[in-house]
Amino acid sequence: ALQTARPFDKACYLGIRAQDIRAGAGENSFACTVTERIDNPFSVTMLVQAAPGGRTIAWETDRETAAKITAGSIMLSLPPEKILLLGE
């Protein structure tokens, strides 16, 4: 079950900013596949999918973290305090 900092019983949607997603295992972690890498001037945006044919998620990270990703698969986590409760 998804862990959030507050109960989300009245939320219509949940969201998270791309820069708030973290590399590695932790709360709300999931394995995903990197489908595209976009180099920005000061960061890297990775487009990932948790399941083949699933929705694409944008993850923005620093260049140092992105350089450590050598395979197409990575574990990401969604910190509970960074999950946005939308539509309350």
Image (tube, rainbow, N blue to C red):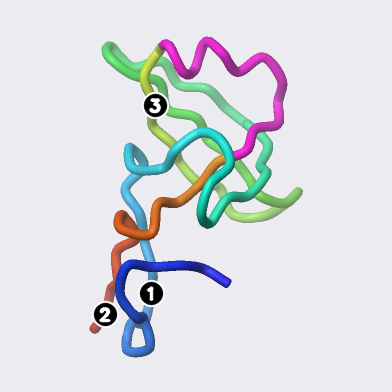
Confirm or deny contact between disc 2 and disc 3 (CB under 8 A). Answer: no
Using the numbered discs, state the Cα–Cα distance from disc 3 to disc 1 in whole angstroms: 24 Å
Please tell me the numbered disc located at residue 75.
none
Q: Which residue is mark 1?
A: 13
Using the numbered discs, state the Cα–Cα distance from disc 2 to disc 1 in whole angstroms: 6 Å
- Write the start and end of the magenta stretch as one range: 64-75
Does dot 2 land on a helix, a strand or a loop?
loop
Please state which of the two labelled residues, at mark 2 or mark 3, is closer to the viewer: 3
Q: Which residue is mark 2?
A: 87
Q: Residues within 10 Å of mark 3 (few under 14, many from 20)?
A: some
Q: Which residue is mark 3?
A: 61
Q: Residues within 10 Å of mark 1 (few under 14, many from 20)?
A: few
Which residue is found at the position 63% from the left and 45% from the top? 49
Q: Which quarter of the image is occupied by the C terminus?
A: bottom left
Upstream in sequence: badge 2 or badge 1: 1
Confirm or deny contact between disc 2 and disc 1 (CB under 8 A). Answer: yes
List x then y, in percent, for residue 47.
Answer: 53, 35
Quadrant position of residue 12: bottom left
Which residue is found at the position 39% from the left and 26% from the top? 61
Q: Amino acid at mark 2?
A: Gly
Upstream in sequence: badge 3 or badge 1: 1
Does dot 3 land on a helix, a strand or a loop?
strand
List x then y, in percent, for residue 17.
Answer: 31, 48
